[in-house]
């Protein structure tokens, strides 16, 4: 089955498919990939298309150039977008929509980080399932230096990922940390030398292309249930996901490949 054709509505977001991976690259290098309105707006529709595309097993977010993943919001737009109360509301809703689209995407997501990952960049990264970073990356949550309100969902993602102590440290001080400290607190998954980042990314794109997509997606959705308050936990939904894996043609293929001592070929059904 032929895959979908992906087209970005703005040249500040580059999109391409490589094998089973959809790449979404923020392309505003003159401003260290600061997120402008059109960049936020491009994300949800691209992720919806990825969810509907049976050929896509992973979505990778990255930043153009070697200096930044995302350096925050494009403050050149603040007077237009955040100065008036209605504009603030619209801007925050737009950012929230994009970040929750990443967080709730049924397809696994990965942030490939090199250079500055600041403010909104951290929000994008922690909305992803996996974060890879070059050793020269720098992280910061500078809300306290800007006087802006920080969304509940962004703070919850940060606390869920690194715990309340580390989250308050980063948030209260607005200090910058390097990739080694980011990894030590669980903010990033793995760190490597900048010239090794493509190789490390390829390890993940290949693994997700090879592994059973129904099993991986079920694991992602069950993890999301685990993070909910116990009163909202949907056990029946989790059990239905598990049953779906065992009843799939992929499970039959996995068993057969194991017995035949060969690599399985999973099709997501």
Image (cartoon, rainbow, N blue to C red):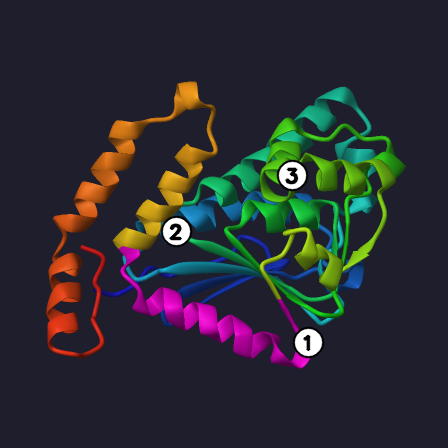
Label 3 and label 2: CA atoms lie apart by 25 Å
Q: Which residue is mark 3?
A: 163
Which element carries disc 1, helix, strand or loop? Answer: helix
* The image quarter in which residue 115 lies: bottom right
Q: Residue at x 74, y 45 (%)?
A: 119
Magenta includes 98? Answer: no
Q: Which residue is mark 2?
A: 107
Dot 2 crowding, Cα within 10 Å, few <14, some 14–19, many 20+: many
Instruction: Tell me residue 239's x, y (percent).
Output: 23, 36
Dot 3 crowding, Cα within 10 Å, few <14, some 14–19, many 20+: some
Q: Which residue is mark 1?
A: 194
- Please report the bounds of the magenta region as a residue range: 191-213
Which element carries disc 2, helix, strand or loop? Answer: loop
- Asked whether 218 or 97 is in front, the reply is 218
Q: Earlier in the sequence, mark 1 or mark 3?
A: 3
Residue 15 appears in the figure:
yes
Q: Earlier in the sequence, mark 2 or mark 1?
A: 2
Number of numbered discs: 3
Residue 210, placed above or below residue 239: below
């Amino acid at each position: 089955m032929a895959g979908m054709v992906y087209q970005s509505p703005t040249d500040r977001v580059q999109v391409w498919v490589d094998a089973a991976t959809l790449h979404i690259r923020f392309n505003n290098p003159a401003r260290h990939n600061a997120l402008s309105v059109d960049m936020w707006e491009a994300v949800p529709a691209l992720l919806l298309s990825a969810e509907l595309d049976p050929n896509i097993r992973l979505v990778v977010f990255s930043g153009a150039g070697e200096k930044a993943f995302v350096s925050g919001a494009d403050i050149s737009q603040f007077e237009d977008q955040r100065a008036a109360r209605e504009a603030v509301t619209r801007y925050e809703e737009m950012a929230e929509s994009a970040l929750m689209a990443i967080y709730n995407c049924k397809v696994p997501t990965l942030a490939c980080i090199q250079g500055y990952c600041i403010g909104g960049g951290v929000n994008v990264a922690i909305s992803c399932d996996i974060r890879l970073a070059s050793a020269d990356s720098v992280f910061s949550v500078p809300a306290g230096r800007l006087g802006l309100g920080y969304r509940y969902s962004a703070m919850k993602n940060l606390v869920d990922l690194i715990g309340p102590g580390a989250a308050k440290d980063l948030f209260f001080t607005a200090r910058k940390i390097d990739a080694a400290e980011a990894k030590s607190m669980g903010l990033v998954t793995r760190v490597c030398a900048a010239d090794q980042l493509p190789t490390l990314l390829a390890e993940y794109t290949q693994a997700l292309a090879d592994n059973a997509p129904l099993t991986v997606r079920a694991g992602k959705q069950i993890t999301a249930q685990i993070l909910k308050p116990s009163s909202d936990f949907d056990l029946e939904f989790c059990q239905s996901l598990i049953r779906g894996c065992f009843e799939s043609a992929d499970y039959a293929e996995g068993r057969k490949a194991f017995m035949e001592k060969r690599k399985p070929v999973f099709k997501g059904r």
